[in-house]
Image (cartoon, rainbow, N blue to C red):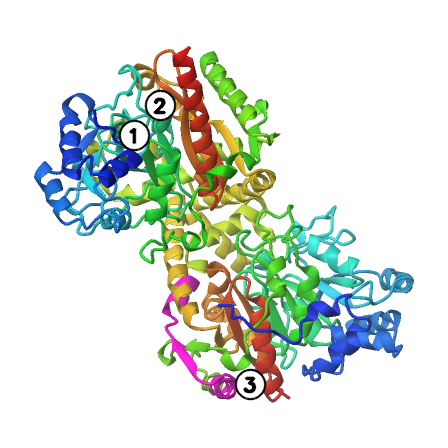
Amino acid sequence: MPLQFRRDVCIAKYIGRLTNPIEAYRSEMSSIRYDTTSPGVVDLLHKYRTGETTPKEVVQEAYYEITKSDTNAWIAKRDEEDVIADAEALSETTIDEKPLYGIPFAIKDNIDFNELPTSAGCPGYTYRPEKTATVVQKLIDAGALLIGKTNMDQFATGLVGTRSPYGICKNVFNENYISGGSSSGSAIAVARGQVPFALGTDTAGSGRIPAALNGIVGLKPTRGVLSNNGVVPGCESLSCISIFARSVDDTEYVERIGAGFDPDDPYSRQSEDMFDVSLPDVDSIRVGVPQESDLEFFGNSEAEHLFEDTVTTISKLFGDIKRVDFSTFEEASDLLYNGPWVAERLTTVGEFIKTNPDDIDLTVRGIIRDGEMYSASDAFEAFHRLEELRKATAEIFENIDALIVPTLGTIYTIEGEQLNPIEINSELGYYTNFVNLIDLCAISIPTGKFDQGPTFSISVIDDAFDDMQIIEIADKIHTNISQPE
Amino acid sequence: MITMNIETLQRKYKRGEQTPEQTVETVFKRINTAETNIWISIRKKEAVLADIEHLSDLSEQPLYGIPFAIKDNIDYTELPTTAACPKYAYEPNQNATVVNKLLDAGALLIGKTNMDQFATGLVGTRSPYGICKNYHNEEYISGGSSSGSALAVARGEVAFALGTDTAGSGRVPAAFNSVVGLKPSRGMISTNGVLPACASLDCVSIFANSCREAIQIESITAGYDTNDPYSNQLASTTDLSIKSKQATDHVVGLPDSQYIEFFGDDEAARLYDEACRMIKQTFPKTQVVNFEPFIKTAELLYQGPWLAERLESVHEFVSNNAEAVHPVVKKILIDGKEYSAMEAFRGFHRLAELKQEASQVMEEIDALVTPTTGTAFTIEEVLEKPIERNSQLGYYTNYVNLLDLSAVAVPTGRFDSGAGFGVTVLGSKGSDAIVSAVGQHIRDMNEKEESKAVRQ
């Protein structure tokens, strides 16, 4: 629930309102803590302003980084010369006019860009879009430089990163482990410092799981805030464009620029008011976590300890933590893959799967075809149940300002995942599946590290349109937690 | 002659000119179920009179001593709920939330009214408790599904009545019998204790003699209810008081003629033209708007997966008791089985697109005025083609709940046959008071013209 109080640091004022927005920004946001030697969005803008580097140099570095590592993160890249030409054209404008001046970025390959094909991770499905997706166009208009399109679980069906004919995406910290998905390539490109931010999509957790495992931030905005026009959706009524970056503030910065009502997207919503809220005083924030009996780590005691450590830190920041009944969220999660929403996936790719069954990943095909089992009557029954669950969770959110959960309860090796794909996928979604169904917003931030390498992360979750509040809370936690090595 | 409307009764009680007991006596004198088929069950007069003893007084109870009826798909513990299917009948162990609110406000429940079975129909002919006939001409249909509730108000048997409205059941019978039918915004009045037709779309609706009275009933019954999953907080943030002075300031939209349809009924076309002429004279700000998204949405309701939602609540009963179900209702419900979940999602996606288009239209105006029905049918005509003619009756009503609008049906004229003709004032979600104000103004102007005509 939104509370009333002022947030001193309101990024709105950095977008074209101050004479030197980036300086002001940096002085207030003293610690951009996410890892890597590569600069984030705001860092980079600062460097351009001081003349430390130029968009052209940054683009060249990005291509060098991409070429030198073989990560399967990319499905298609623009020609370096074209991007450099775009970078050079920026010299006619200024950072004050273009809030993403010279910032390289990547998009998941289910988002349209008119110069490159869209494959959704399926070569046979590939088409040439006539138009660029609304959000991508907004970012480009703001001066961002699109590098290319990233690998993904086919048709955004999976939370694993292994279901793509363009190759398995490996965890950046340990190649034996999964990267998570479905926005695997976008997360990896950011985690490896190839681009400061990237777009993914998120239906069941695809914008959060791969962020969580690869040490970066994943913001899943409120549904309808970023237009879905030009996106091949997982589930049209649930999917959102998501944002990967190396700091919480970078995700907010990009969300503000990408947001906006779009009459071309039937699920677009008015969100202007969302960004101009005054946010709760940190001391008054009431944080909830699932009661202990509802926590699931699937036998991974290391994850359990990592979460306990995080909860300790959070309770130091926000005082008492409320333990909430998680079973309502869990039941909603179950509806997504074990209910009629699977049939929603058929509306996008059902026809293609029927005529080209051999072009589809076996697991993906199995999941989507299960949608055929459900009747309209089943669908309505599930909607009615979901409506009841929404009412119940709304009551929980009356008493807390944010729900904090592990983003995922354990980590998996690629080998293990391949042996048991469906079961592992549903374990992966335990803390993420319910978010879009219930109409919440969420942000995943790393708070620890497994011995095997992958990061442990938590998600901060709240009601629709409380994006600024979860960002504030996540930022507070993030700047106060010792950064994973 | 006792006038059975809320405002008159309130005035008389206040002045001590009449008592609730006298009102109840009149109610029971007027009820003549054998001829009208209006009621499915009626409380004993003694029980109603006993209720009066427990009333406090006028100042504390805004509906002190006001008699009302409820459609028989709304629960009241003393009477069974049948939904017009005797075999389906059950004894509810709780009152519907909305009924409790009315009783708490001092209203007197008289009984439960006839309806198209399972609220499936806009005709008033699909009930084993008998066909409801038009108030003005017995050969014509009353309209449905809330047929009995509309007739009880039209005949002055009660001062107001509750119906339900999914596809137009609270508006079509209001139009044919010349009463007001208010369909509040979805989620405003709790549907807890109401047997669903389509749970995600259903609303409790209000029949009364004026829009002013109807919105008064809404303001008393509206409110968030944790027991209704589709209830929302709108009631706590919405002003439901009519500011009648400003009614003519509202921008009134009229549909472009391309999608206006009277099914060959020239008389209906003339009646609508007359209503439009009066509206243009009265409201300085009128404008013609794109009607296409509304009509395209209407097609989704009866030709799309929402039929499956109808089946959901009575699925088991219909499967096990096929013989107990009205044949036309059965056919409609069984058709719901045909749809897959994928088709349901396709329907939702299409609806989302149309909603976006319709909301762009609604942004330009405060209220949209359309005919309530494009024509009127005799009972014989409906029995001859029950499904086709039913869907024609929904042409101007089916889209309203799908698009999440509020609406009030207001009588504006009569066919030569006698059957009522009217218009519906539509507004965006939450604009219930605006549509009521505009509707009330149309009604006032209409009555002025009528009395002028009588004097001449």
Q: Nearer the viewer, residue A380 or B363?
A: B363
Task: Give the quadrant of residue A199.
Answer: bottom right
**Is any part of residue A68 visible from this angle?**
no
Range covered by the magenta-colored residues: A306-333
* Marking on residue B150: 1
In the drawing, does residue B38 fall left or right of residue A107? left
Task: From this view, report whether residue A113 is shown above or below residue A447.
Answer: above
In the drawing, does residue A91 fall left or right of residue B197? right
SS type, badge 3: loop
Q: How many marks?
A: 3
Give percent across and percent down for residue B82. 20, 38
* Marking on residue B83: none
SS type, badge 2: helix
Residue placed at 50% from the left, 18% from the top? B274
Please name the residue that numbered disc 2 is placed on: B176
* Marking on residue A450: 3
